[in-house]
Image (cartoon, rainbow, N blue to C red):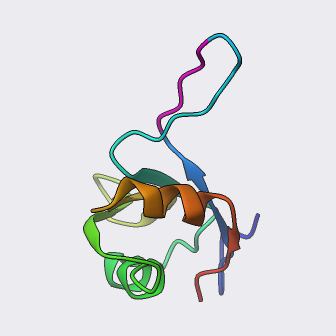
Amino acid sequence: QDQGGGGGGGAREEERRAEGDNKEFYHGGKLFIGGISWETAEHDLRTYFGLFGDLSDVIVMRDKITGKGKGFGFITYEDPRTSELVAKGTHEVL
């Protein structure tokens, strides 16, 4: 997926565990957001993903030395059911 420019990205559940029938479980509404532009900031993720529900946490992972984004982050919805719905779709953060 695109790592520069306008960025595109997919929302995927970050913490999965399998039980017997490989059923997926969503833990606390936390989602991994990958394939985002290196210029994407927390505000950008909050603005876009906040359209789907209330967010309790948004973080863009950054290099400790340069401060440059690493192209991924995490969001946490207050209602874990919202994360299930969002994870089923494909999203593009502009």
Residue at 66 percent across and 79 percent down: it is 92
Residue 12 locus on image (x, y percent): 60, 52
Residue found at the far left of this picture: 56
Q: Is residue 17 visible?
A: yes
Q: Which residues are magenta?
A: 15-19
Q: Is residue 91 left or right of residue 13?
A: right
- Total count of labels: 0
Residue at 59 percent across and 89 percent down: it is 94
**Vertical position of residue 13 compared to residue 82: above or below:** above
Q: Is residue 71 magenta?
A: no
Q: Is residue 26 left or right of residue 29?
A: right
**Vertical position of residue 45 compared to residue 61: above or below:** below
Instruction: Place residue 62 in its image quadrant.
Output: bottom left
Near-viewer residue (35 or 13): 13
Near-viewer residue (93 or 62): 93
Residue 19 locus on image (x, y percent): 59, 14
Q: Is residue 58 left or right of residue 32?
A: left
Near-viewer residue (27 or 93): 27
**Vertical position of residue 17 compared to residue 61: above or below:** above
**Vertical position of residue 52 compared to residue 66: above or below:** below
Helix, strand or loop: magenta stretch:
loop
Residue at 54 percent across and 55 percent down: it is 84
Residue 1 locus on image (x, y percent): 76, 63
Residue at 46 percent across and 78 percent down: it is 49
Q: Is residue 16 magenta?
A: yes
Residue found at the far right of this picture: 1
Q: Is residue 73 visible?
A: no
Instruction: Place residue 65 in its image quadrant.
Output: bottom left
Residue 40 locus on image (x, y percent): 47, 78
